[in-house]
Image (tube, rainbow, N blue to C red):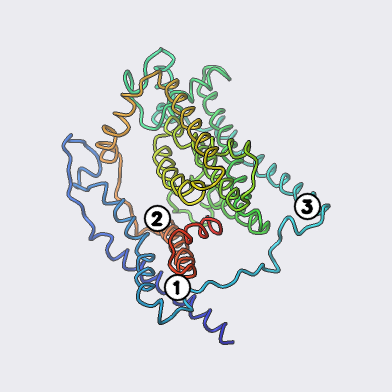
């Protein structure tokens, strides 16, 4: 009974800290204001009110990090007085949790078949929706013109970022149309058809990612896929929340192929660390794609490139210094990573028609100076949908922080051991 009461107190304590952190983050939201600069005299919604677009980023970071920051401060001052708050409960497998290895052979086959049937139903349903869009959707001259117009320029032999400019990425804008026209004929429908196919592939990778992530808990995998699929689909979500922001609904873009590919490769690498014994071929293949995807993502969509290269640099350094540096796999990991990076750079060189200089100049120096000022907006944090997604992210960061603190406490504050155990258990 005493253990149960302590567990209840612990969860109430954690919920209270998280809630206080969110409230304080929201309180500080509008008080965070950076100086406004517009040297190029860009005209847009933000320039009219002299709002620095970096405000959104700093406010978001403060809101997301504040609950975890409070938790860390409390840990520093209470670790000796209340050690039970930081002691990790021994992991016990729930009786309701179904693991594939626990099932008999016939049940495993049956369950695998059920997964594929479930996949086929979801993919067929999505295909019907996408084909309806491809055939009946009204032409959008602005968004569809971003790929159609640049595709014409690319076919004319013009060099990207030198002879013509686009914002998303070489594949997302010109190459998408060029490839669609070469496959299905030169029409608007061809581009929509290729986009629909790419979306389905992205959805399949999304499913694979979820199942790989929760492969030890099949019930959780199914529930997660159902919730995520039907919550990100605008048709279903609008039935529940008619005023939910569209930008938060369309979570599964075709350009997320790069995101899901990178995440799947990362999961495999984490499993290799836990297993400690893996074939060299598997390690080479996964390490190749792990290093290939973040760089080639810049050629698909620049924003995904920034996200993935940031994650890659952090994860790759942790993998090397804490796991592979003294391992027999070190050489294989480094060689495969170098090959992946080289292959990605070569592919970028080809699709950019050898124009690396202008690409780097535009992506890293020119576009950041005007893009957000031109079409950015003030993040409406106090609208339900926008606040909801921020609280969801903050809760994930808070959980990760708490688990890291628990590992740090139980390893007697040895940082390298903490990183090692944390990656193996929670990565």
Q: Considering depth in this image, is 263 or 418 the residue closer to the camera?
A: 418
Q: CA distance from mark 3 to mark 1?
A: 38 Å
Q: CA distance from mark 3 to mark 2?
A: 41 Å
Assign a secondary structure to mark 2.
helix
Farthest residue to the bottom: give it. 1
Q: Using the image, tell me which numbered label, if any, was put on residue 27.
A: none
Question: In the rendered structure, which disc, 3 or 1, sits on the residue that comes first in sequence?
Answer: 1
The residue under label 3 is: 108
Which quadrant holds residue 389?
bottom left
Assign a secondary structure to mark 1.
helix
Q: Position of residue 142 (x, y in %)?
A: 38, 30
The residue under label 1 is: 14
- 70, above or below 313, in the image: below
Which quadrant holds residue 19?
bottom left
Residue at point 71%, 61% (across, down): 98
Q: Considering depth in this image, is 159 or 388 the residue closer to the camera?
A: 159
Q: Position of residue 413 (x, y in %)?
A: 43, 67
The residue under label 2 is: 386
Q: Considering depth in this image, is 88 or 321 the residue closer to the camera?
A: 321
Q: In screen coordinates, is 47 left or right of 186?
A: left
């Amino acid at each position: 009974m005493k253990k149960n009461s302590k567990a209840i107190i612990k969860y109430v304590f954690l919920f209270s800290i998280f809630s206080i952190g969110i409230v304080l983050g929201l309180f500080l939201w509008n008080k965070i204001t950076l100086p406004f600069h517009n040297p190029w005299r860009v005209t847009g919604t933000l320039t009219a009110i002299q709002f620095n677009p970096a405000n959104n980023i700093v406010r978001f970071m403060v809101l997301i990090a504040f609950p975890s920051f409070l938790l860390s401060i409390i840990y520093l001052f209470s670790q000796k007085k209340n050690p039970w708050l930081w002691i990790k409960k021994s992991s016990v497998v729930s009786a309701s949790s179904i693991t594939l290895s626990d099932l008999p052979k016939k049940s495993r086959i049956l369950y695998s078949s059920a997964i594929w049937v479930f996949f086929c139903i979801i993919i067929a349903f999505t295909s019907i929706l996408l084909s309806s869009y491809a055939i009946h959707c009204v032409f959008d001259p602005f968004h569809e013109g971003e790929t159609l117009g640049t595709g014409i320029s690319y076919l004319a032999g013009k060099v990207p970022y030198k002879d013509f400019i686009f914002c998303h990425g070489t594949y997302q804008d010109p190459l998408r149309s060029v490839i669609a026209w070469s496959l299905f004929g030169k029409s608007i429908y061809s581009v929509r058809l290729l986009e629909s196919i790419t979306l389905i592939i992205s959805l399949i990778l999304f499913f694979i990612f979820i199942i790989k992530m929760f492969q030890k808990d099949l019930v959780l995998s199914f529930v997660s896929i159902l919730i995520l699929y039907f919550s990100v689909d605008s048709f279903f979500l609008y039935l529940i929340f008619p005023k939910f922001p569209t930008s938060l609904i369309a979570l599964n873009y075709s350009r997320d192929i790069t995101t899901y590919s990178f995440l799947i490769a990362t999961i495999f690498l984490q499993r290799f660390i836990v297993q400690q014994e893996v074939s060299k071929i598997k390690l080479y293949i996964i390490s190749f794609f792990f290093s290939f995807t973040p760089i080639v993502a810049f050629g698909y969509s620049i924003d995904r490139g920034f996200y993935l290269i940031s994650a890659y640099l952090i994860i790759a350094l942790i993998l090397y210094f804490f796991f592979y540096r003294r391992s027999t796999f070190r050489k294989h990991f480094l060689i495969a990573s170098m090959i992946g990076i080289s292959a990605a750079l070569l592919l970028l060189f080809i699709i950019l028609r050898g124009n690396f200089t202008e690409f780097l100049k535009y992506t890293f120096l020119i576009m950041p100076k005007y893009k957000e000022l031109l079409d950015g907006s003030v993040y409406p944090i106090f609208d339900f949908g926008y606040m909801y997604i921020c609280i969801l992210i903050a809760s994930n960061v808070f959980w990760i922080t708490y688990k890291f603190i628990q590992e740090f406490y139980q390893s007697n504050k040895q940082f390298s051991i903490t990183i090692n155990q944390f990656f193996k258990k929670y990565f």
